[in-house]
């Protein structure tokens, strides 16, 4: 049996649900498919940047966001302790939020459904269908059902089965981080600050990455760490054991569970985080890529949710605009949008990704950041840039 839609979206994470919501807002007939049944988990630090909050506000979720735990800044340890606040950007919140992914992603999916999007859960896409020219014309679901669509948005995450099935070649392929996290109770007062630990040593090498503690409120925290794959020995790192080592440096009176306990109870999970536009250009005839499937993650920080939301909203909008005015063979409008949003920043980010893979460079960078004169000057410039109206 074949059903026909304007747009079929594969993956109901933040990128897919944002794309579906946006396209339905514009009057498109949309189906979103996910292999999971919701609420489903996704390994994540669960931290929403101020920019991510602003996209959720734009999607009309301001009331719902009040239920999430608010954070007003970041305590950074480099290893000396300093504080970062969220910049005051015109029209943007100056706070972040922490929320478990099953809660956030289910909210977003229901929000898309309320706009008229057809939701298919437990529907694993095995691959795209293509016409004789190679243009994507829909998807096939496990079990054999096919869904025909004028265009497909692949928002199917870091391991994107759609991308793999298309054997997609991209000049920026391979830039990524490996990140691991566990959620747990901690015997410490609730905090309104994120915590970032920059000093991460593996066999004496300063790693290009960081560890974090993000608070959910009500005594619960998310602890994790991530490092990028330009570090030569990244595959030698046992991420779970490494997370355990980091946790053992935290105060004993927090009564954190041992890493073995977390592992035994499947409470610790690692995942890949592609970054720097790993699927460039972000479309092929009949298909657009968004979120982790595009490698939309920010190369320096690894923040992925705001980028998933932004690329999803843009993909939904550009897909409908192109289908209305031209057809499914050309989504250059989306490429232009993504290039204008992050093209220059991600070019620098890919260079940074390569450079900090050298432990000596990472070590030197950390020393600079730990020097308060250098740091104050750098932060002043960054805040000035962030708070200027042109970057809002
Ligand atoms: C440990 C870790 C910590 C992180 N912490 C943060 C953080 O604190 N803040 C932040 O901003 N970012 C963070 N990130 C990045 C962030 O999690 C991702 O960038 C974000 O989830 C990307 O959203 P997405 O919608 O593109 O993909 P996903 O959220 O991965 O969603 C993809 C969806 O596709 C579905 N899917 C996959 N295959 C198929 C298939 N064959 N058929 C149908 N459906 C399919 C999946 O079930 C899933 O629901 C972190 C990443 C990791 C790994």
Image (cartoon, rainbow, N blue to C red):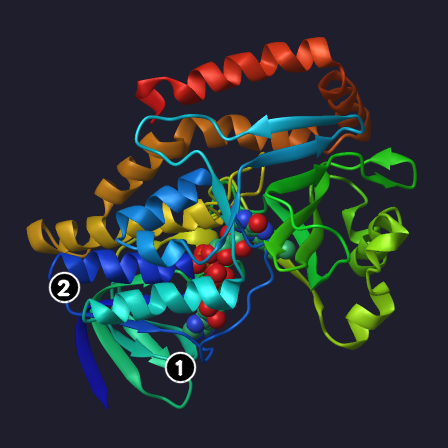
* Rendering quarter of residue 54: top left
SS assignment at label 1: loop
Whether the residue carrying mark 1 lies under 8 Å from ligand 1 is answered with yes
Q: Which residue is drawn at the image coordinates 42% and 45% (left, top)?
A: 52
Q: Is residue 226 left or right of residue 281?
A: right
Do we see residue 276 in this rendering? yes
Which quarter shows the N terminus? bottom left
Numbered label attached to residue 123: 1
Residue 85, percent across and down?
55, 29
User: Does any portion of residue 154 appear in the rendered image?
Assistant: no
- Marks 1 and 2 close (CB-CB < 8 Å): no
Q: Pick whichever of labels 1 and 2 is earlier in the sequence.
A: 2
- Numbered label attached to residue 231: none
Question: Is 392 placed above or below 95 here?
Answer: above
Question: Which residue is pictured at 32% across the width and 30% down the height?
Answer: 340
Above or below residue 182? Residue 50 is: above
Ligand 1 closer than 8 Å to the CB at disc 2? no
Q: Nearer the viewer, residue 257 or 266?
A: 257
- The percent coordinates of residue 388 (x first, y second) are 36, 17
């Amino acid at each position: 049996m074949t059903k026909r839609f304007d747009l079929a979206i594969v993956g109901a994470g933040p990128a897919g649900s944002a794309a579906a919501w946006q396209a339905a807002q514009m009057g498109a007939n949309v189906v979103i498919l996910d292999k999971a049944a919701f609420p489903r988990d996704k390994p994540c630090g669960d931290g929403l940047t101020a920019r991510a909050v602003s996209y959720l506000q734009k999607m009309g979720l301001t009331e719902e966001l009040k239920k999430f735990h608010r954070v007003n800044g970041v305590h950074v340890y480099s290893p000396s302790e300093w504080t970062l606040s969220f910049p005051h950007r015109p029209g943007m919140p100056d706070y972040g939020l922490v929320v478990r992914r099953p809660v956030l992603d289910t909210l977003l999916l229901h929000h898309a459904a309320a706009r008229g999007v057809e939701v298919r859960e437990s529907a694993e896409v095995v691959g795209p269908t293509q016409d004789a020219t190679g243009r994507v014309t829909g998807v096939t679901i496990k079990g054999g059902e096919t869904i025909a669509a004028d265009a497909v948005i692949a928002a199917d995450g870091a391991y994107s089965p759609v991308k793999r099935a298309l054997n997609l070649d991209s000049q920026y392929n391979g830039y990524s981080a490996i990140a691991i996290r566990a959620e747990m109770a901690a015997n410490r007062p609730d905090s309104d600050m994120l915590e970032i630990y920059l000093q991460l040593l593996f066999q004496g090498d300063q790693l290009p990455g960081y560890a974090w503690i993000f608070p959910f409120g009500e005594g619960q925290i998310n602890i994790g760490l991530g490092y990028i794959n330009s570090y030569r020995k990244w595959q030698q790192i046992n991420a779970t054991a490494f997370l355990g080592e980091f946790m053992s440096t935290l105060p004993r009176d927090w009564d954190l569970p041992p890493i073995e306990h977390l592992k035994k109870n499947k409470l610790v999970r690692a995942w890949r985080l592609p970054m720097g536009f790993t699927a460039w250009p972000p479309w092929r005839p009949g298909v657009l890529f968004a979120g982790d499937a595009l490698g939309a993650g920010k190369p320096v920080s690894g923040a992925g949710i705001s980028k998933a939301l932004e690329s999803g909203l843009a993909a939904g909008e550009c897909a409908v605009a192109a289908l209305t005015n031209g057809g499914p063979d050309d989504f250059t409008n989306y490429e232009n949008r993504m290039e204008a949003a992050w093209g220059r920043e991600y070019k620098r980010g890919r260079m940074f990704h390569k450079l900090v893979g050298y432990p000596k460079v990472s070590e030197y960078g950390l020393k600079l950041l730990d020097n308060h004169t250098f740091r104050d000057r750098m932060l002043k410039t960054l805040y000035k840039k962030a708070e200027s109206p042109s970057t809002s």
